[in-house]
Amino acid sequence: MLRTHNCGQLNETNIEEEVKLCGWVSNRRDHGGIIFIDLRDRYGITQIVFDPEHDKNSWGVADSVRPEYAIQINGKVRYRPQGQENPKLNTGKIEIICNDIQILSKSKTPPFEISDYSDISEDVRYKQRYLDLRRNSVLENIKFRAKMNHFVRNWFVQKDFLEVQTPLFTVSSPEGARDYIVPSRLHPGKFYALPQAPQIYKQLLMVGGVDKYFQIAPCFRDEDPRADRHSCEFYQIDAELSFVEQEDVLQICEDFIKDLINNIAPHKTIKDNKIHRLTYQEAIEYYGSDKPDIRYDMKIHDLSDIFSNTEFSVFKQALEKNGVIKALKFEKTLTRKEIDEITQVAQDNGAKGLAYIIYEEDGPRSPILKFFSDEELQKLEETMQPQTGEMIFFGADTRKIVNKVLGTVRTDLANKYLSLDDSELAFCWITDFPFYELDEDTGKIDFSHNPFGMPQGGMEALENQDPLEIKAYQYDLACNGYELLSGAIRNHRPDILVKAFELTGKDEDYVKEKFAVLFEAFQYGPPPHGGFAFGFDRLMMLLVDRENIRDIYAFPKSGKAQDMMVGAPSKIDENLLKELKLTDIIKKYYRDN
């Protein structure tokens, strides 16, 4: 064996033992002729001592090594001298006096310091990610991800779910985001699509009698990256169950998330030790978002009744156009510069401006107060309960714009000026999503979330209700301002599926063509079923307190959707393009169009 122990293993119980260690030179120090090397592997660091009076040959080799050399040492474990212990290390009470050292491989000078304290640009780190992986902060994320993978699999297996790997080469779907497509060599002119989610396959598993399915599923979507969305690929904890109602699924999710946090992230607490619940309508009206951060209150209040007879032209014009007047209270006061900045946030989201009142020791102050009657101001204060040192912000426009604007203002204020506790996780179910929505550009009805969900009320609702009033058995789980889970009770009846699409202007032939396998499978006794998908990466990002989802991947894509290390995406050899008949296909496309 090249090593008898790892670099984080030895302690006082190993004193006087002869050991072999392998690792990388993390640090080399020369103190008055005695050389100290901090030897590092993924388990920790051990201090190695090279004394020329003890072993001159070993000292000579140690004198030639440099950072990131891979070495093997043989030596005896001893106590560190009194006063030189390092309590930050598991091995901090011992050191090894070296008897022999072998250089296993040399290293060029790294392009950046292998340290958690060095300030390195993302592009440089990702270009040589194999070096970045040696940094403890990066390695800890990889170790946590492995631990989380292990826990997830064990938990679902213990709950009698079957782990099934669904195909990665499938057919393009007309719903959802843009697909990544793969040309077929054996079928020129035809393409596979990488799955955006295993949706169809997991429903087919239910038809096949696999009543409890799960997998940690790779998913692929051609979407622009952002802080909480990785480029190209991501993973989700995907599950589906038969013979269940919505409450059954929600309970399983709650049990899982509580067990996950208690076991692998005990430093986190769940707000109020429960999963809160809001309907979609409540979330939008109170927080301006379907993924609200409820660690802080700051609810949005509808003040339209209070100002129903207002003479303030901005409010009056909004109400005359069937709009609303709404407001939120902020527990701090802002400077003029800060107010201008938050006003710009409001304007970027559709507002014409952002009215406000500041409450100071000598009373309220605002340019709009002169337009308020005494009665309006009194009712406003009774509703909002402002205190000295607080502010009220107003929105006046259509309900949709006001909710969006004040929701964004609420989030921006909290992120900039509140001391939010990242150790607290505020989970909240969002339920009762609208089944349909009105496309403002076309004036037509379309699905608002997922066409495969079951409408509440089933066929009767589709036949007798206003489509825009129909709710879906659709649910999301939000936490600290992020969407962590999406799921639904599925529509397992082909007649309801056809009717649901008919209300969007698509007939039965469309359903049979676009969702042929699902429609056909539903002719053979499909069970009622529903499921969910946790965003594995986004959930982990919260558990390890990372602000960017790229930080939790071993080999992440950059913010420009590139793998800086291997150079992907890249050009393809022309011979391969010819073999796939792609050049002919492209020429024909441009010729025909």
Image (spheres, grey):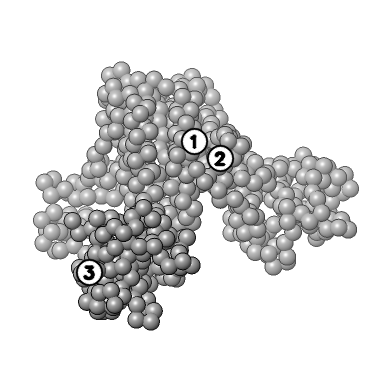
Q: CA distance from mark 2 to mark 1?
A: 8 Å
Q: Quadrant of the N terminus?
A: bottom left
> Label 3: which residue?
100
Q: Is residue 226 left or right of residue 297?
A: left
> Label 1: which residue?
258
Q: From this viewpoint, which residue is outermost toward the bottom?
A: 32
Looking at the image, residue 52 lies above or below residue 294: below
Q: Tell me which label, 1 or 3, sits earlier in the chain.
A: 3
Q: Amino acid at mark 3?
A: Asp
Q: Is residue 281 left or right of residue 149?
A: right
Query: In which quarter of the view is residue 32 placed?
Result: bottom left
Q: Tell me which label, 3 or 2, sits earlier in the chain.
A: 3
Q: From this viewpoint, which residue is outermost toward the top?
A: 525
Q: Identify the residue shown where x is 86% and y is 45%.
A: 378
Q: Identify the residue shown where x is 30% and y is 29%.
A: 162
Q: Are marks 1 and 3 in contact (CB under 8 Å)?
A: no
Q: Identify the residue shown where x is 57% and y is 45%.
A: 424
> Label 2: which residue?
270
Q: Tell me which label, 2 or 1, sits earlier in the chain.
A: 1
Q: Where residue 160 sits in the image (x, y, percent)?
A: 34, 26
- Mark 3 or 2: the one toward you: 3
Total numbered labels:
3
Q: CA distance from mark 3 to mark 2?
A: 52 Å
Q: Where residue 330 sits in the image (x, y, percent)?
A: 71, 52
Q: In this view of the protein, which residue sits in the foreground, 396 or 274?
A: 274
Q: Amino acid at mark 1?
A: Lys
Q: Are marks 2 and 1 in contact (CB under 8 Å)?
A: yes
Secondary element under disc 2, as helix, strand or loop, is: strand
Q: In this view of the protein, which residue sits in the foreground, 542 or 397?
A: 542
Local crowd size for mark 3, using a 10 Å CA cut-off: few (<14), some (14–19), many (≥20): some
Q: Is residue 451 visible?
A: no
